[in-house]
Each structure stands twice: as structure tokens, then as C-alpha cells.
Image (cartoon, rainbow, N blue to C red):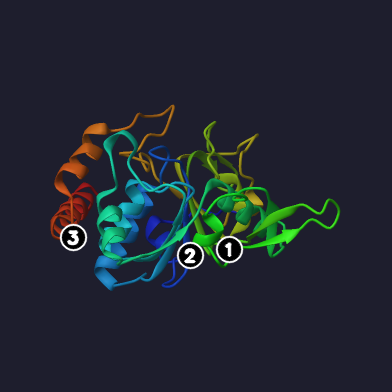
Amino acid sequence: MNKLISMEEAVQSVASGSMLALGGLLLYRRPMAFTRALLHRFVQTGEPKDLTLLAFTAGLESDLLLGAGMLQTVRTCYFGLEIFGLAPMFSAKAASGEIRIIEETEASLSFGLRASIASVGFMPGRGWIGTDMLTLRPDVHTVIDPYSGEELVAFPAIHPDTVVIHALCADQEGNVQIGGNKGADEELAVSAPHVIVTAEQIVPRLTSADIVAPFVDAVVLAPGGAAPTSCHPLYPLDGEAILGYTEQVGDQASFQPYLARLLEKETSEK
């Protein structure tokens, strides 16, 4: 089966009010080309809106969506730009209370995705025991292990609607190689009903894969699709571009002209 589609077709699959999960980790292998195409669609049509963002770690791609006003809720255990500092739009909107933040940790995200994969309502674990996280998240309950009597946290299943992952390469059937630093991408791919992969290159057929075809619904050719984040070993992080973002953007007033310049540049390069 040939699963190749255009980027324009790919962004049409994200519906308003849905949970969008973005793959990659920190400033590595983030789906930036997809993000820019989604921003184009939003600026032109006002859709999609009121999204819930799910990211194991959220970075530049997520801050752009947040600044544009596309996100209603954020679920991540980290939102920032590593050595380049805070994510400016997240910092501004979190401080003003404009967005809903669901407190997460690596444990809650990992166990929540595993529960979804296992088709159960929760996954038990020891994370959060002895911490204040259960106070911050009153929707998360504890259970008693019927065999040991131990109290465990029942991490609720997380069900993303659409997952977008940037890959080193893929074939037309949807077999994908994402490299050594996988983050939570393999778990994300198995937990969602709709998975889109943007790939640096399309090859005739992969003989080995990190994510196999049955879990992938669509493949988009996107060379340089993670830039300015890195896509090791193909290209490094563009620190100058990310630093430029933090220097130019600090609030909503400064974000709008930055977004206009970004989309204008994207259009002129096509």
C-alpha cells in the first residue's frame, strides 16, 4: 500500500478540539515542517483550534502553535528551549492563565500511553507516591495491589487522536526509521488511531524499522523537516535560528510579526 500524501493533505487530518501529539525530544527531530504547514492552515482558515497538545517534551514547535492561539490545553513534562532558555509564549501564557496546563511527569506520560496501548483504563506504578503530584492532579487515584497490598498510583490512559513523528527515512508502505534517540515516539505511534510520519527521505523498501507499517497511516516527504531543530546524523541544531526566536519574541505583541515573517519566508521558499 502506498501511504504517501502531501503535507497539505496531512494537516487537514487534525481536527479542532482533538489531542495532537508531537514526536521528537527536546530540540531533536521535531516535526517543524508539519508545524509550519499547520500554522499556514490556521492563519488561512481558523482551523484547527482548541487543540490539546501532548508532547513528552515540548519545544519550539509547540511554542509556535501556542503563540498562534491554536492550543487550549498542554500536557507535557517539560516545555522549553534547553540551553536557549524558556519557551517565551508558554511562559507568557502560563503566567497569565490563558492556557490549561495538565501537570505531567515522565512517569504519568509513559504509564498513560502504556495503558492506552494495552487498551485498559489505567496503568499502575510507584511514581508520585510520596509527592505532591496527587494533590495537583486530583483526577489521578491510587489503587491497592491485590497481591502485595501495596498502594500504587493508577495513571489514567492517554488517548491522542493524531500523532505526528519526524523520521530519518520511511518507505511508501509506512515502515519508519527514527534513529537512536527515540524519545516516546514508538509508544505514541502505537497509542493513536491516526499516525502521520514526515520523513527526510523515502526509500523503496526498508528491511528494518523502528515503527512498522501497520501503525502508520500516512507518510509525507519532508527533507529538512525538523529544522531548525536537529536531525542527527543528517544535520545539526540551528542555534542561531532558535536564539533569534528567543530574542525577537517575548509576548503576544512580538510573536505576531515573527509568525508573519516565518510564514512569508516559508511561502517564498516554496
The span from disc 1 to disc 3 (Cα, nearest Å) is 30 Å
The span from disc 1 to disc 2 (Cα, nearest Å) is 8 Å
Tag 1 and tag 2, C-beta contact below 8 Å:
yes
User: Which circle, 2 or 3, is nearer the viewer?
Assistant: 3
Q: Which residue is mark 1?
A: 159
User: Which circle, 1 or 3, is nearer the viewer?
Assistant: 3
Q: Which residue is mark 2?
A: 19
Up-down relation of residue 9 to residue 168 (above or below): below
Residue appearing at x 61%, y 37% in the figure:
206
Q: Amino acid at mark 1?
A: His
| Mark found first going from the N terminus, 2 or 3 | 2
Residue 124 in which image quadrant: bottom right
Answer with left or right where residue 251 lies relative to residue 167: left
User: Secondary structure under badge 1?
Assistant: loop
Observer-nearest of 153 and 190: 153
- Density class for disc 1 (Cα within 10 Å; few <14, some 14-19, many ≥20) is many
Q: Amino acid at mark 3?
A: Gln
User: Secondary structure under badge 2?
Assistant: strand
Up-down relation of residue 155 to residue 237 (above or below): below
Q: Which residue is mark 3?
A: 252
